[in-house]
Image: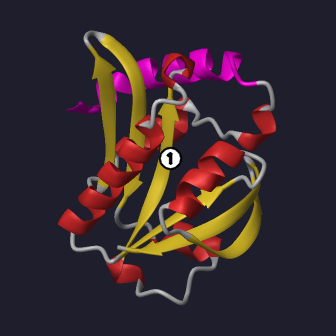
Amino acid sequence: MKIAIISDVDLLVNFQNIVMEKIEDKSTWGMYSKQFLVDFFSKPTNIIELYYDSQALVGFLMLTLDDKEEFEDYNVNHTNLNKSAIYGGVMISPLYWGNGLQKQMTERLEYLAKKANRSYMVATVSPDNKYSYNNLINTGYKVIGEKNMEKGYRHIVVKEL
């Protein structure tokens, strides 16, 4: 794994395009635009890690540590926002689906959040994306709300770390 930097934006966009080509129901997945990723990198408390198998990119994860606006968008008010992190997402190459990588990357996100003294992880997930939804629910995330977002209808889930 390696920490992504701003010069990796095109790599991330291209990787997403490759993954999205293999997804039948695109409404259950969200893609990040190039501008979103550039803006994401502009905040020093945001993290993107790239996962490799030899030289091949197999996935990436995103973590947001301080984004009060996004918490407000999620209407998350039951947790201490200063002690919360946002599970920004995980995207994995279709060649690696079904190998437990999403669970491993979720554990990594939680580790990074704890390391930054966060006590809660907040995420959104499409209930129609049964693999991601079940991965989160089966690892302790609880549904606390729902929201119709730009990338579609999502459940808002939270886990105490």
> Residue 3 lies in what quarter of the image?
top left
Question: Badge 1: how crowded within 10 Å, few (<14), some, or many (20+)?
Answer: many
Quadrant in which residue 154 is drawn: bottom right
* Residue 15, image x, y percentages: 50, 19
Name the image colouring. Answer: secondary structure
Q: Is residue 66 above or below residue 23?
A: below
Is residue 130 part of the magenta span, yes or no?
no
The residue sitting at 24% across, 67% down in the picture is 114
Residue 19 within the segment the image draws in magenta: yes
Residue appearing at x 71%, y 45% in the figure: 129
Quadrant (top left, top right, bottom left, bottom right) of the N terminus: top left
| 4, above or below 72, in the image | above
Which secondary structure, mark 1?
Answer: strand
The residue that appears at 59% across and 15% down in the rendered structure is 18
Residue under pointer 1: 89
Q: Is residue 43 visible?
A: no
Q: Is residue 25 above or below residue 140?
A: above
Extreme-top residue of the structure: 55
Q: Is residue 39 above or below residue 134?
A: above
Measuring from the top left, give residue 119's x and y in whole percent. Answer: 32, 78
Name the image quarter holding the C terminus: bottom left
Q: Would you say 114 lies left or right of 124 here?
A: left
Q: The magenta stretch spans which residues? A: 1-23
Q: Amino acid at mark 1?
A: Gly
- Residue 40 visible? The answer is yes
Q: Is residue 67 left or right of residue 146?
A: left
Q: Position of residue 16 (x, y in %)?
A: 56, 24
Q: Quarter-wise, where is residue 148 in the image?
A: bottom right
Magenta stretch, main secondary structure class: helix
| Residue 137 drawn at (x, y percent) | 58, 63
Q: How many marks?
A: 1
